[in-house]
Image (cartoon, rainbow, N blue to C red):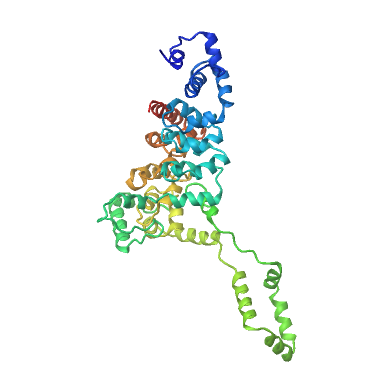
């Protein structure tokens, strides 16, 4: 005898039976009843709304059994784990059910509320999956300590590469920020780049430094800049009234000065020295940046290229915006550049199109998912370049891209088509 779910799927059940099914009142096993309700909720226009209401109030114990069972149909599990249908009490079981796809959990990790974040952070499956951790990393409901915890569990690209090598080949690999690059390697990169672009350099040798956009609008660096210590009011007053203090000391009799000196022990003197150091004026980031800008403005094109390859992070952050293409691209040739810097460059809107186009052409950067995602979401990225990268995005990022009105409509249409294809593939699994 055919199961009731098969009759309903083939539209052979009478309308009164369909209505009873939508209310959950059929005399069938609980697992089959949930399967019938999900089918109606997803595919039946007449009884779908009633089925969704029934599922929302369905017995929790019965729902929990279905959420835990790996044999539960993919359609049922997909419905239960979808953000719009999720019942938080079922999430721990759904997260550990191997039949629930990572794509479904990724979408939930990206969009879920505070309670969802807490449950997923306690899930062994989530904590052992790089894809799920990266999805959770983009959730706006994460707290700073949780963000740091996730970051500590995600290996750097260098660690991932080291993990794929054999034990005999494995060697300690430093993170990009800590990597020591020999001067010989830097000079070799510089010489090769200058030789490769000799003709361009001859043509543009007199071109001055002209940054793209406003060079002072560097939100990324300002966000990472620690706040300068603020002196207390007494310290500030002391700093602004040196003449008064000096006059007081000079006017005091020698005996008084000696008595004061005796009353100050070693501990107090040490504390006073520490306070003086604490409140001493420090050069601000803006002042240092102005100094670097002045230095760069005096350089010719060869000097700027040399600084782009040899220099530090601050020099690269300025020269990547150089309006001269050959200088800006030289930044990407520096052996000292880190993945974190390139991730920031990939989302900047005040760089040349040629810079954004060149980033994914370098294998090291093309393997970095954050770089790929930032490029596709950057409205300044050339359309043909963005279209070629869309296929590499995860499902939750594709969904966010479709709703992003800043990017070109062509890119959003491809994102929608790719999203549907991946969702259909996930449903078919």
- Residue in front for this viewpoint, 316 or 97: 97
Q: In the image, what residue occupies the spot 44% across and 41% down?
A: 132
x%, y% of residue 249?
A: 71, 83
On screen, residue 138 above or below 19: below
Q: How many marks?
A: 0
Residue 402 visible in the displayed image? no
On screen, residue 131 above or below 204: above
Residue 111 visible in the displayed image? yes
x%, y% of residue 239?
A: 67, 72
x%, y% of residue 76?
A: 47, 26
Q: Residue furthest bottom?
A: 255
x%, y% of residue 327?
A: 38, 52
Residue 101, image quadrant: top left
- Residue in front for this viewpoint, 119 or 303: 119
Q: In the image, what residue occupies the spot 54% across and 37% down?
A: 112
Q: In the image, what residue occupies the spot 40% across and 27% down?
A: 421
- Residue in front for this viewpoint, 129 or 56: 56
Quarter holding the N terminus is top left
| In the image: residue 284, left or right of residue 252 | left
- Residue in front for this viewpoint, 372 or 309: 372
Quarter holding the C terminus is top left
């Amino acid at each position: 005898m055919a199961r009731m779910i098969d009759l309903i799927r083939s539209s052979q059940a009478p309308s009164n039976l369909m209505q009873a099914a939508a209310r959950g009142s059929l005399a069938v096993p609980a697992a089959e009843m949930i399967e019938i309700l999900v089918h109606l909720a997803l595919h039946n226009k007449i009884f779908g709304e009633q089925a969704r209401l029934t599922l929302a109030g369905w017995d929790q114990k019965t729902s929990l059994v279905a959420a835990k069972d790996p044999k539960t149909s993919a359609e049922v599990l997909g419905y239960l784990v979808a953000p719009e249908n999720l019942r938080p009490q079922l999430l721990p079981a759904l997260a550990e059910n191997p039949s629930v796809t990572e794509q479904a959990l990724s979408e939930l990790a990206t969009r879920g509320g505070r309670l969802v974040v807490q449950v997923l952070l306690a899930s062994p499956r989530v904590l052992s999956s790089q894809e799920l951790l990266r999805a959770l990393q983009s959730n706006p409901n994460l707290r700073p300590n949780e963000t740091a915890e996730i970051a500590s569990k995600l290996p750097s690209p260098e660690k991932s590469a080291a993990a794929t090598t054999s034990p005999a080949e494995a060697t300690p690999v430093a993170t990009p920020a800590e990597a020591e690059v020999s001067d010989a390697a830097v000079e070799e990169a510089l010489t090769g780049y200058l030789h490769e672009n000799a003709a361009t350099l001859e043509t543009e040798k007199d071109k001055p430094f002209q940054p793209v956009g406003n060079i002072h609008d560097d939100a990324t660096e300002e966000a990472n800049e620690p706040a300068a210590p603020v002196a207390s009011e007494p310290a500030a007053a002391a700093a602004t009234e040196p003449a008064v203090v000096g006059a007081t000391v000079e006017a005091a009799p020698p005996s008084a000065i000696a008595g004061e000196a005796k009353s100050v022990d070693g501990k107090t003197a040490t504390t006073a020295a520490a306070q003086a150091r604490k409140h001493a004026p420090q050069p601000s980031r803006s002042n240092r940046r102005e100094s670097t800008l002045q230095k760069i403005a005096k350089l010719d094109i060869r000097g700027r290229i040399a600084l782009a390859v040899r220099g530090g992070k601050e020099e690269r952050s300025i020269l990547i915006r150089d309006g001269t293409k050959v200088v800006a691209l030289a930044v990407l040739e520096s052996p000292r550049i880190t993945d974190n810097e390139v991730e920031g460059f990939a989302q900047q809107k005040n760089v040349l199109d040629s810079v954004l186009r060149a980033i994914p052409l370098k294998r090291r950067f093309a393997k970095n998912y954050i770089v790929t995602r930032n490029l596709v979401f950057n409205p300044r990225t050339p359309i043909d370049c963005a279209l070629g990268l869309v296929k590499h995005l995860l499902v939750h990022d594709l969904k966010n891209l479709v709703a992003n009105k800043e990017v070109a409509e062509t890119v959003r249409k491809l994102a929608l088509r790719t999203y549907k294809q991946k969702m259909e593939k996930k449903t078919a699994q």
